[in-house]
Image: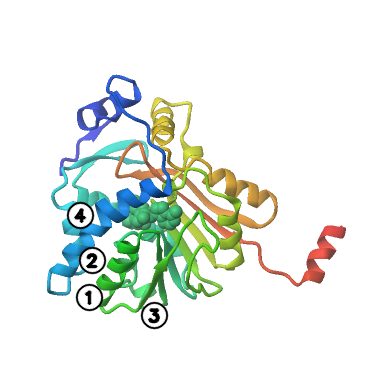
Amino acid sequence: MSKKQYDLDDLPRFSRWPARLLGAEEWQPKSKTAAEVAREYEHEKWGPLLKIVRNAGRGMTVHDADKVVFADLSPQLCSVGRSFRMLTAMAAHRRHIDLVVSALERFQPCNALVELGAGYGTIILRLAKLPGFRRTPIIAGEFAPSGVGLIELLARAQKTNIVAGACDFASSPLVEFQIPEGALIYTSMATPCVPMLDGSFIDQLVAMQPKAVVHVEPCYEHCDTDTLLGSMRRRYIEINDYNRNLVTLLRKYQKQGALQIVAERRAVFGTNPLLCSSVIAWVPEKRRPARDRSKRRAR
Ligand SMILES: C[S@@+](CC[C@H](N)C(=O)[O-])C[C@H]1O[C@@H](n2cnc3c(N)ncnc32)[C@H](O)[C@@H]1O
């Protein structure tokens, strides 16, 4: 793919979003309801993919599934730090996975590796094969039942033992399976599906006492309103009804002493320049005996 560097002025040639954001092209704002998410993922994306994998009659791997998803897509303008690069859809996807891998590195080893909102398992199934995670229990939660089915089938094809089950960031319980203490939990491009996360999402994660939680997610609060690009990203998130409070919530919980944010890298990479992922990692406050906690409050 071309090494030419692009900038914001090039974006309208490759995306209809600048015209939509400027009101030059009509666009009906959407609400990210659970029904809308089910339409997109269960019915339009993972459901049909599950049929393909089931009907293939041979053990399709996650790489085969990626080809179905990405091979026919046109090259796309991606956001890499402050610049723009044209990448094939597959190269862009790999680059996003590399970002997840690098964000998790410092928290290894861990008692389990857990992805929540794992889609069809394109990331977690790759991570399961990395030397650092080969002996680690692998767990995946996903909102769409067909996604859970895909994760199980694709894991079988690569001989990975995996626990996969239902997960909903907007519900309590968050997951329908056990997550051991000391797990490394991450999310990738999944929190946008819940416009406003509730505090119980964080409460439940903290209660799992993970080693760390890493979000590789587009963060509304990281869109810098001093720049045209940042303002466009905010507007894009607003009219698509994507998440707008992940960072706010984490900062609030940090202030209350429930967790500590240990890494925060803003808008690092976006396969879509208007939905650029940040990395934000946090660790829960260590559980101390009740006597200790009351001493601290009394001080
Ligand atoms: C863009 S895909 C990302 C999949 C995968 N994490 C990745 O990075 O390739 C978003 C995923 O989030 C899931 N999702 C949507 N709403 C969710 C919710 N409320 N709780 C958990 N996952 C959700 C979708 O079903 C979908 O599989």
The colour mode here is rainbow
* Near-viewer residue (260 or 60): 60
Residue that label 4 marks: 69
* SS type, badge 3: loop
Identify the residue at horizontal 42%, vertical 49% (top origin).
Answer: 34
Which of the marked residues, 2 or 4, is nearer the chain's N terminus? 2
> In front: mark 1 or mark 3?
1
Q: CA distance from mark 1 to mark 3?
A: 18 Å
Is residue 215 rendered to the left or right of residue 4? Answer: right
Q: Residue at x 51, y 38 (%)?
A: 221
Q: In which quarter of the view is residue 160 placed?
A: bottom left
The x and y percentages for residue 262 are 56, 55
Mark 1 residue type: Ala
Q: Which numbered circle lies on residue 135?
A: 3
Q: Which residue is tagged 2?
A: 62
Q: Amino acid at mark 3?
A: Arg
Query: What residue would you read off at disc 1?
Result: 157
Residue 65 in the image: above or below residue 29 = below
Give me the C-alpha separation between circle 1 and circle 2: 8 Å
N-terminal of the pair, mark 1 or mark 3, is 3
Q: Is residue 188 visible?
A: no
Specify whether residue 131 is in view: yes
Q: Where the N terminus falls, by quadrant?
A: top left
Give the mark nearer the N terminus: 1 vs 2.
2
